[in-house]
Amino acid sequence: MKDHPTGLEQIRVLVADSNQTQSEVLTSALRRHPGLKVASCRAELSDCLQGLRLVPADVVLLSDGFSDHDQFIDMLRVLHASHPNVSFILMLDRYDRVLVVNAMRAGARGLFDRARQSFRALCRCISVVHQGQFWAGTEQMSFIIAAISSTPSARVINVKGSLF
């Protein structure tokens, strides 16, 4: 989308946060960042789906305000399935191995640790994820690599019984 006065591509961002004050502060700060066009909604599945219909986004910042991480992952899975061309960044206050691995399996492209990373890093995260890359911290990546390493390799054979 090239409608920024400088001619730079604008990244359309949807902030989905259940904490209204936190959402307003983050949305306001991101709007001041050149190259970002920002909208917001509550971090409820129906609100996110409606927000994506009304204001198409390239990147969704989805805040982990859920006490039940399974509900959070289920919401991400539904959002990703219904909008596969949108990149999802999870903004986490806390995380563990299970949440990190399940989030990536559910379609997250970025895992942003609000407690350890700066606003500047968040802007970089949005840009990196929008470019098709992944964003995760070293500890988060170690969880992902460990999950991949512990899964046995699948052997793929053709109909004649030969390995690909």
Image (cartoon, rainbow, N blue to C red):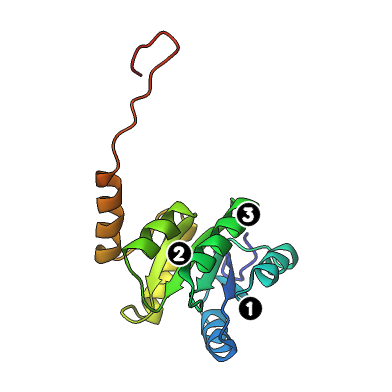
Rounded to the nearest whole Å, what is the CA distance between mark 1 and mark 2?
23 Å
Locate the N terminus by quadrant: bottom right
Locate the C terminus by quadrant: top left
- Asked if residue 156 can be seen in this view, the reply is yes
Disc 3 marks which amino acid? His
User: Residue, x 47% and y 58% (percent of image)?
Assistant: 108
User: Residue, x 63% and y 54% (percent of image)?
Assistant: 83
Dot label at residue 83: 3
Q: Quadrant of residue 100?
A: bottom left
Rounded to the nearest whole Å, what is the CA distance between mark 1 and mark 3?
17 Å
Dot label at residue 42: 1
Crowding at dot 1, Cα within 10 Å, few <14 / some 14-19 / many 20+, comes out as some
Considering only vertical position in the picture, is 146 above or below 92? above
User: Residue, x 56% and y 91% (percent of image)?
Assistant: 21
Q: Position of residue 37 (x, y in %)?
A: 61, 72
Q: Position of residue 125 (x, y in %)?
A: 41, 67
Tell me the residue that label 2 is attached to: 127
* Disc 3, SS: loop
Disc 2 marks which amino acid? Ser
Crowding at dot 3, Cα within 10 Å, few <14 / some 14-19 / many 20+, comes out as some
Crowding at dot 2, Cα within 10 Å, few <14 / some 14-19 / many 20+, comes out as some
Disc 1 marks which amino acid? Arg
Mark sitting earlier along the chain (2/3): 3
* Disc 2, SS: helix
* Disc 1, SS: loop
Considering only vertical position in the picture, is 78 above or below 158? below
